[in-house]
Image (cartoon, rainbow, N blue to C red):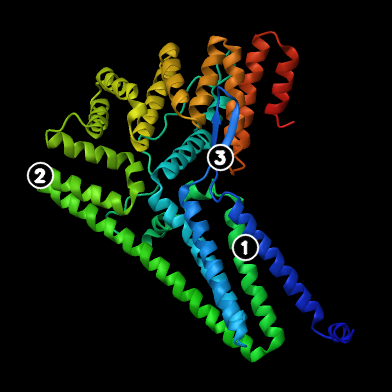
Amino acid sequence: MIKFQSIKSDVDILPKLFNVAAALVALLLIVLSLVGKWFKLPMYIVETHTFYTVDSQITLLFKLAQLLLFLLFGIITVAICKRGGAWMKPVLLWAICGFVSTLWYPTVLAHRDSEIMGDAAWLQQQFDTMTWLGGDVYRAHSERSVELGTGVNAQDPPDRLAVFKPPVGSMGWTQINDWMWWFGYGPSFAQFVGGSWFFAVSGYVIIGLSVLGFSWRKSEVEARSLFKSGVIWTTFLSVSFMLLTVISVKLVHWQLSSAKVALSESDYAGARKSIETASVIMPTLLCDSGVIRQLGYCDVMDDKNGSVDSHFFQIHRLERHGHYDRARSMLDSLAAQSDTLPRNQSREVSRQQLRVAINNINSGRYTRAIHYLDSVISNEQNCMQAQFHRQLMSLQTGDLAMNQKMNQSIEEVIQGVRSKTKRGVIASSAWMLAQGELNGGNVDEAWRARRQSQGK
């Protein structure tokens, strides 16, 4: 009873209760972050109508590291409290370590996971190609055939894919945009980052503020000392992680510069070795179409024409010189062995097939376009640009079942995209479905699809 009266008479009871509530919320957010996905790349299996999202294995490593930090600082805190020490400093340090390491997660992801980030970069590139003012969505509403009322021209995707610009040439602070991408905070991450990553960041921030709040109510002098310690540790850890990233980028820069020098000296084996060393430091370099072709160029010049990389270079060279049939024949041979290729190479095969399909669409060769589009869709579970053009082809050929299937697939995949401009893609797809339903005599379904295309 006496204890209750002392609590009741405490003038700081409300601030303390607020800090306790905030700390509990923060702990809940951190627990949720450990359960949920930090990165959510959308996937959709057309045959089974199954939508799911893929996270990186790097996420699991970060979660395990944060659990170890929790156990370590928990043990330290208990030991300090038993000796009569204050618990606030180790708890604050734990929150700072968790906060800074979580902010470093995009950097590690962008540098190390070539499969996830390569797929994310490609999906982001598809979305940008479809939604910019000269893209597929714009054309679907502005360049219309008389009968079908839909765009008959398709936007050719960029010839090159990359998670970020390779660190070559000037690397000063004038390239601040490139540095943001090298630190992992590029569109490929921002578009598909999971809410659980934000939970982790928010949770550690709130924990730190709660500890400072407890300390301030107890003693302003101790609170100022604790705050200074927090600033020092945050700065130290942030700078340490930034230096690790800068060193990694600089090492890659030196290796690529060495490769450039080796090429100028006709040392193609040495150039390839330098590029491969750079890709060990930063594996996502191998997502870069330009890097793949550079490796292929080294193989061709070193009389290793049978490598897969050399085929990509030769396809690119043949297309530039107008030998399209030879280039497509070589691409078809690569596509036949796509299942046995590493992900970076099989992705590049699908990208080139998509470019060929779009060229056939714009040339009016719909049968050949459908062949390439079906090949891409069967190998890629989130190629919305191929699905969009396949829906267009189904409208042109009167294949209502395929029209419906592609519309459903696009709607499923695009729900994993954060950008609000995805409404334009949904509207264009629904509009093509409405045209297909109307041509098939399904007036009610056509009306529903038409209303959906209008956002109703």
What amino acid is at disc 1? Ser
Q: Nearest to the eye among marks 1 and 2: give it.
A: 1
Q: Kindly check if marks 1 and 2 are in contact, taking CB atoms under 8 A apart as contact.
A: no
Which residue does the numbered mark 2 point to in the structure image? 266
Residue at mark 2 to residue at mark 3: CA–CA distance: 45 Å
Which residue does the numbered mark 1 point to in the structure image? 202
Q: Nearer the viewer, residue 317 or 155?
A: 317
Tag 1 secondary structure: helix
Residue at mark 3 to residue at mark 1: CA–CA distance: 23 Å
What amino acid is at disc 3? Thr
Position of residue 130 relative to residue 16, above or below, is: above
Question: Would residue 225 be visible to someone looking at this image?
Answer: yes
- Residue 404 percent across, percent down from the top left: 62, 19
Tag 3 secondary structure: strand
Crowdedness of circle 2 by 10 Å Cα count: few (<14), some, many (20+)? some
Q: Nearest to the eye among marks 2 and 3: give it.
A: 3
Tag 2 secondary structure: loop
What amino acid is at disc 2? Ser
Position of residue 326 relative to residue 6, above or below, is: above
**Sequence-wise, which precedes: disc 2 or disc 3?**
3
Q: Nearest to the eye among marks 3 and 1: give it.
A: 3
Position of residue 195 relative to residue 142, above or below, is: below
Task: Quarter of the image for the C terminus: give it.
Answer: top right
Q: Is residue 128 left or right of residue 21?
A: left
Question: Would residue 171 be visible to someone looking at this image?
Answer: no
Residue 53 circle label: 3
Crowdedness of circle 1 by 10 Å Cα count: few (<14), some, many (20+)? some
Residue at mark 1 to residue at mark 2: CA–CA distance: 53 Å
Residue 31 circle label: none
Q: Is residue 184 left or right of residue 246?
A: right
**Sequence-wise, which precedes: disc 1 or disc 2?**
1
